[in-house]
Each structure stands twice: as structure tokens, then as C-alpha cells.
Amino acid sequence: MLETITSYVAIGDSFSEGLMDPDPDGTPDRFRGWTDRLAELLVDSPAGGPELLYANFAIRGRLLQGVIDEQVPKVLDLKPDLVSFCAGGNDCLRPRTDIDGLANQFERAVIAMRDEGIEVVMANGFDTETMSPLLRAVRPRVGVYNAHLWTIAQRHGCHMVDVWGLRPLYAEDMWAEDKIHLSPDGHDLVARQALATLESGHSLPTTGFGMPPRTTRAIRDVVVEESKWAREHLAPWVGRRLRGQSSGDLLSPKVPDLSPVRKIAVDDEVDVTAAAHEPGFSGGGPSDGEGSGSAEAAGERTGVDVETAQLISDDGRVAVDGRRIVKEDEDE
């Protein structure tokens, strides 16, 4: 177990900013998230205490280099007892990202913080196996990045929060409507996984690598749902990327200075053990069938660069026409 933590800083992207976990005070576009929840839990934990100070510099949309350039220097100035450093997920979404190079960047930042005596807690990437077909395509890249992160944690004495292996996290109610960010229950579960890791060095008591059972849906319903998701959530992301914009542009950190942790009633604990042993826990998500075509062809048809077409097409299943996301065999 750690020595008593008196100060904790969170850095990273939307995962650590806490997107889709609305702030209890109702402030528009401000989120609570697993890092706020972890700070709240630490106040009542032997690892922390009521005098704990907390800051959060994480900003949605940030690539790893942005986190290193903007947020790591602030950590080095403050020298908190603990920093949670979770970044690189947005980079993994980009097909041309050099995953080995990404891990090298991450490790250099970890070394800089560890050299200052700062305890570093990391989280590996989500398993996208049961997510949208468009996100399943990044699973191999995330898997390689995760392997590097585990190595970095072992080399430098960091604490690893295993979200890839936290199978109850992949139940449908753990995810927000955008299928990219966690719901409040999902953030709560990650916070408890992080606390268990810090307190004991072990994960919460789950076993196996099957996924929680998911709602069985007709293929037509799946297509309608995926098309709606693409219009409402993927298309805006693609548009921002083509314009060179980020969802975090012009945003400031939500907790810019070390401050006392807000007193918020902690939600009832998610029963991860029960969830892990529900009947059918070894099942997978619905099958959407096979696509056809290629990213190059999708790019030629739509005027989108090949890299972006590869990302959004899932082997040609979906393309962008500048107005909306459509199935390739759908009438325009």
C-alpha cells in the first residue's frame, strides 16, 4: 500500500476529465468522472485522508503530446504525492499512429515524474471488442499499446489500473450513449478499481475474459442504431478532425489548482463480483455481418483522405459523404 497521499493531480484527456458523468452541482459541460470520484474515495481511505488536496488538468480531445506539453510541466512544478496519467487513447484512434513511438513518449513523461518522487498511477486502454464496429477496428492497436504500458509500469514502479480486464465495465449500462465514454456507473467502477489498486496492489475480484451478456437485437435494429450513432457522434468528430479542431479547444482545466476535495455522497458500490458471475457472462456482442470494399475506395467516393476513410469505414462498411454518415449500400 502507498504511504498516505496528501495531494493528487489527474492529467489526460476526456477519460480523466470525466466526460458523460455530469457534475452533481449541475454546472453545464462540467463533469465529475472517475478521477473526481477517486479523490472522494481517497478522503475516506487509509491511503488518503480528509486533508487531501486535488487538481485536475485533463482536457477532452488531447493527444498524448498535448498532455505532455501542457499538463506534465504543471505536475512537475506542483510535485504532488500522486498523479494519474492516462493518455494516448485518442492517438490510438488514428491508423497511422506509431504505437511504439507513442509508448516511448509516454515512458519519457513517466520517468520525468518518477524522478521527482511522484507516485504514478496509469490505466490501460478499453477493450473495444463489443463496441461499435468502427471502434473494434482499433482493438489491435490498443492491445499493443496496453502491453507497452504494462512494461512501463513494471520498469518504473507505477500502479496500473486494469480497465481492459475489468469485464463488468463492458456491460451496456456502464457506457454513455456515445459508446465512447463511460456512464456515471462506469466512472464509479473505474474509481473503485483504482482505489483497490492503490490500497492493495490488486484489482477488484473478477475472473474470466468473457464479456457481460448484451441485449439481443435484430440486424435491422443494429444498423439503425449504428447509423444514428455515426450521425450524432462520429460525424462531428470526423468534421472536427478534417478542420484541424479538437473538442477541447478553448477549454481550461476544471480543477486548475490543488484544492480540498468536494464533499459529495458516494454512490452505492457496483457489485462487480455478482456482475462477473451472471449467467451468460462469456457471451459477446451482436454480429453486424461482414463489410466489403476498402478505405481507399471509400476515400475516393467521398473525398475524404484515405487515413480518415480507413478509420471511419471499418473495411468499407460506412463512409462519409460530407453531409452525413451512410451505409455504402444505402440509397443517397
Image: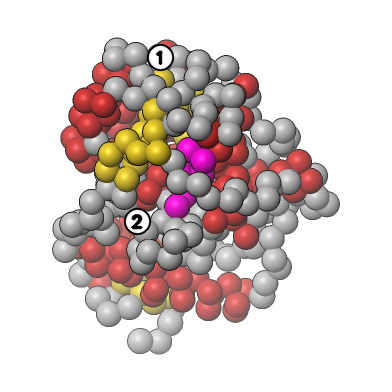
Looking at the rendered structure, the kind of residue marked 2 is Leu
Q: Is residue 286 visible?
A: yes
- Residue at the farthest bottom position: 331
Taking the spot 67% from the left edge, 72% from the top edge, the residue there is 217
- Mark 1 vs mark 2, CA separation in Å: 33 Å
Looking at the rendered structure, the kind of residue marked 1 is His
> Which of 211/78 is in front?
78
Q: Secondary structure at mark 1?
A: helix
Q: Position of residue 88 (x, y in %)?
A: 34, 39
**Residue 3 falls left or right of residue 31:** right
Frontmost of labels 1 and 2 is: 1
Name the image quarter holding the C terminus: bottom left
The residue at which mark 1 appears reads as 156
Total numbered labels placed on residues in the image: 2
> Which of 117/178 is in front?
117
The residue at which mark 2 appears reads as 311
Tell whether position 194 is magenta: no
Taking the spot 51% from the left edge, 54% from the top edge, the residue there is 182
Residue 186 position (above or below residue 242):
above
Residue 321 position (above or below residue 233):
below
Q: Position of residue 170 (x, y in %)?
A: 61, 51
- The circle on residue 20 is none
Task: Report the magenta residues as a range.
Answer: 32-40
Q: Secondary structure at mark 2?
A: helix
- Crowding at label 1, few (<14), some or many (≥20) Cα neighbours within 10 Å? some
Taking the spot 69% from the left edge, 60% from the top edge, the residue there is 214
Tell whether position 33 is magenta: yes
- Residue at the farthest right position: 279
Q: How is the image coloured?
A: secondary structure
